[in-house]
Image (cartoon, rainbow, N blue to C red):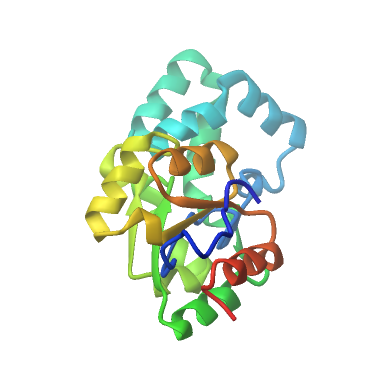
Amino acid sequence: MTGTAHDSATRPQVDTVLYDLGNVLVGWDPYGPFVGLDRAEVDRFFDETDFLAHNHEQDAGRPWAELRALVAASWPQHAHLVDRYVDGFAASLTGPVPGSAEIVDELAASGARLYGLTNWSAELFHHAVPAAPAIGRLEGIVVSGEVGLAKPAPEIFRLTVETFGLDPARTVFVDDSLPNVRSAQDVGLHAVHFTTSAALRDELVALGLLG
């Protein structure tokens, strides 16, 4: 846990959960689309193109066609692997994070407000709910690729607060990335560093969201 205060005497009652999605509600494995290929070939693609850094730009709204063109120009031997990732993206989603759907159900039954804030390509977001149906229970989701901003930029947290009319003092943000957690804290949200669903449930109990 990172940065969650448990002083109920001075803290407004928390009644809203703002969820990250990847590796909180739905598992993500970037190697999934490449099953059947030699792992060393995929690692070379990731390393030589700095794919994960480029993937952040995709999450921030850059079209996949632009990345495909960039890789084709600079690393032509890897261009087909961009296509394979996009075409096989559903295979990168490993299903619901264990225990996550049950917590969403508990929170919904308790009357908590539930929202999402995810770094995710707008072109690929349609795969999210089929992979983890609990995502469909959230009242609204800010998708980074749709708004042209990505965590940990503080602007996307401020936009989310404004979009959903959230009170930061009554909202807990849950994310598996420590930089995202720290950025959320900087804009006044409670923040929990997600490790397991069991640990998250303990945090939500301590915050008074679950009994």
Is residue 66 shown to the viewer in this render?
A: yes
Q: Residue at x 27, y 46 (%)?
A: 159
Q: Where is residue 186 in the image (x, y as percent from the top left)?
A: 43, 38
Is residue 61 shown to the viewer in this render?
A: no
Q: Which residue is drawn at 66% across and 44% down?
A: 31
Q: Nearer the viewer, residue 155 or 78?
A: 155
Q: Which of 194 and 87 is in front in this view?
A: 194
156 relative to 6, above or below: above
Q: Residue at x 75, y 36 (%)?
A: 39
* Quadrant into which the C terminus falls: bottom right
Q: Where is residue 143 in the image (x, y as percent from the top left)?
A: 35, 50
Q: Which of 81 and 123 is in front in this view?
A: 123
Horizontal arrangement in the rendering, residue 147 relative to residue 76 (left or right): left
Residue 77: quadrant of the picture: top right
120 relative to 62, above or below: below
Q: Where is residue 175 in the image (x, y as percent from the top left)?
A: 54, 51
Residue 6: quadrant of the picture: bottom right
Q: Residue at x 52, y 57 (%)?
A: 90
